Image: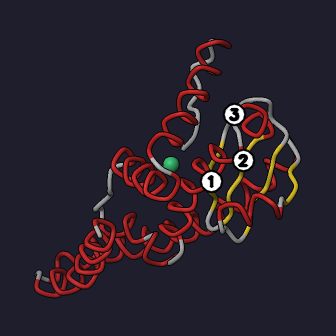
Amino acid sequence: MGLRFYWLANVFALINAPVVFFSMSCDMLWFMKVYFIYAIMAIALMLLAPTVYKVYLMRVYGYERDRDLEELAGIEKVYVFNSALPKAFTLGREVFISAGMLDILDGEELKAVLTHEKFHVAQNATPLLGRLKVLTFLPISPEKLEIMADEYAASIVGKEVLESAKKKITEFYSTVELGEIEYV
Ligand SMILES: [Zn+2]
């Protein structure tokens, strides 16, 4: 629900932008040009970034599709990459989870982490809308998105399972004393 309002606000801001520009004097035309160049570059970069990062992941870690995990969480594409550190993230509509995460979590906890990522997949499902925030300067805070993703995961697997997964991940990082983010 919160996300829907956020998209609406973005769409509204985007529709509003030309209206505001056209109501300005002609002296402001240069600003409009700069804005459109910025918009085109931002879209190009956003479309390219996941592809570039996937190539990097393949080179550095290597990854494979995992049909069982896809079925477990109802996600179209899940890839397991070869890192001992427990990590999970979403690129576009594809979820990446590390072998290290599979090592420390049980089936239900894995489902919790994957369901959290599934929220991000849904959030990225409309590529154009998902990228509006760079055009309208109405960014939703990453923290807020993480909380929403956790709430979604908890609503599917239960709060206890989610907390147990997060606890194991936190414990792993506190043991190895790496200041890395566990999952995003
Ligand atoms: Zn997240």
Q: Residues within 10 Å of mark 1 (few under 14, many from 20)?
A: many
Residue 41 lies, in percent from the top left, at 51, 68
Rendered location of residue 57, percent (x, y)? 79, 47
In percent of width and height, residue 42 lies at 49, 66
Q: Which residue carries the number 3 mark? A: 86
Q: Nearer the viewer, residue 39 or 90?
A: 90
Q: Nearer the viewer, mark 3 or mark 1?
A: 1
The Cα–Cα distance between marks 2 and 3, rounded to whole angstroms, is: 8 Å
Say how many tags the image has.
Answer: 3
The mark nearer the N terminus, 3 or 1, is 3
In screen coordinates, is 83 left or right of 91?
Answer: right
Which of the 4 quarters of the picture holds residue 148?
A: bottom left
Q: Quadrant of the C terminus?
A: top right
Give the quarter of the image for residue 105.
top right
Write the residue at 27% across / 78% down. 8
Mark 2–mark 1 Cα distance, whole angstroms, equals: 8 Å
The amino acid on which the numbered mark 1 sits, given as a three-letter code, is: Leu
- The foreground one among 98 and 180 is 98
Q: Indicate which disc residue 97 carries.
A: 2
Residue depicted at 28% across the width and 62% down the height: 138
Earlier residue among tags 2 and 1: 2
- Taking the image as shown, residue 71 lies to the left or right of residue 112, namely right
Number of the label disc, if any, that sits on residue 114: 1
| Element carrying mark 3 | loop
| Identity of the residue drawn at 43% across and 72% down | 39
